[in-house]
Amino acid sequence: MYIRGQAIGTTAMKRLGTILMALVLVAALAAIPLGATAALADNGEDNSNDNADAAENNSVEPGEQLTGVVGVQDAEIDGEVSDRTFGIKVANAASDEAKADIVGDRLDEIEQQLEAHEAELEELDEARENGTISEGEYRAEVAKITAEKANTERAAEQAGATAGELPEDVLEERGINVEAIQELQENASELGGPETAEIAQSIAGENVGNGVAGDFEPGPPGGIPGDDAADASSDDGDDDEDEDRGAGNNSADQRP
C-alpha cells in the first residue's frame, strides 16, 4: 500500500512539473512583441485556427490551471480507491448471490454518477455562455469532470467483467443485464464528446482519464492476509526453511 501511495505521489509530481513548465512557456510567449504575433497570424487558415486554440489556452490563469490539475488528480485517486474497494468486496463475497448483489449496488452508483456528470456539464456550458464563470474556470471544471467520467467508465467495465463470471440465473433474479452494463460503459465514454477530452488535456496533459495505477484484476491488493500470492510465497518460504533444517540435520549426522 505504501508503494502505491509512492507511485501516486510520483505521478502527481511529474504532472505538476509538466504544468509548471507549460506555465513558464506561456509566460515567455506573452513577452513576444505584438507585431511578431500579428505576423504569425497571417500564415493562412490553419495557422489562424492554431492561434485561436492558443488564445483559448492562454485565457486560463495559472491558478485556474492548477485548480484543474489538482481536481483531476483528486478524482483519479478517488476512482482508484473506489475500484479497489469494489474488488475487495467481490473477492470477499461468500457466494455468487452475494457477488451479484455487490454488482447491483455498483450499477446503481454508476447510473447516478452518469446523470450527475451530464447535469454538471450542462450547467457549466450555461454558466460559460451567460458569463457566470470565466473560460479558465470552465476548462478547469471540465477537466475534473472528464477524470470523474473516466472513473465511471472503468467502474462499468469492472462491474461488467465481474457480472460476466456469474451464473445467468443469478443475474436474472436481480435484474442484471451484461449488455446493459456495456451500454452504460459506452454512454460514459461518449459523454461530452471529443471536445471535452481536448479541454481536459489542455489543462492536465494527455494522461487525463487514464487513472492512477492502470488496469488490475478484481480482488484484494497483493501482500495482504488472504491473498493467494502472499500465501503461496509464505508456503514456499516454509518449505525452504524445512529443507535448510533437513540439510543441517544431515550435516550433524555425518559428524564423527
Image: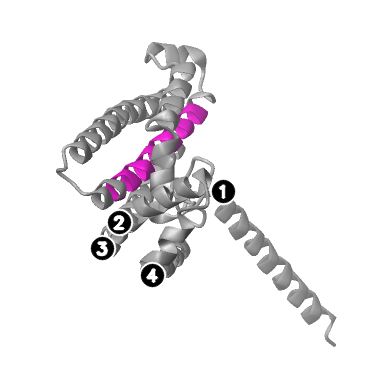
First along the sequence among labels 4 and 2: 4
- Neighbor class of circle 1 (other Cα within 10 Å; few <14, some 14-19, many 20+) is few
Query: Can the viewer see residue 168 in this picture?
Result: yes
Label 2: which secondary element: loop
Label 1: which secondary element: helix
Q: Write the residue at 14% across / 43% down.
A: 132
- Residue 63: give its label: 3
- Measured as percent of width and height from the top left, residue 123 is found at 21, 34
Label 3: which secondary element: helix
Determine whether label 3 and label 1 are within 8 Å by CB.
Answer: no
Q: Is residue 100 above or below residue 242?
A: above
Residue 142 falls inside the magenta stretch = yes
Specify the principal SS of the magenta part: helix
**Amino acid type assigned to the residue bearing label 4 in the image:** Pro
**Amino acid type assigned to the residue bearing label 2 in the image:** Val
Q: Write the residue at 51% across / 22% down.
A: 166
**Amino acid type assigned to the residue bearing label 1 in the image:** Asp
- Measured as percent of width and height from the top left, residue 54 is found at 41, 54
First along the sequence among labels 3 and 1: 3
- Which residue is the site of mark 4? 33
Q: Is residue 180 above or below residue 146?
A: above
Choose mark 2 or mark 3, whichever is in front.
Answer: 2
Image quadrant of residue 119? top left
What span is in magenta?
140-162
Count the labels in the image.
4
Choose mark 3 or mark 1, whichever is in front.
Answer: 3
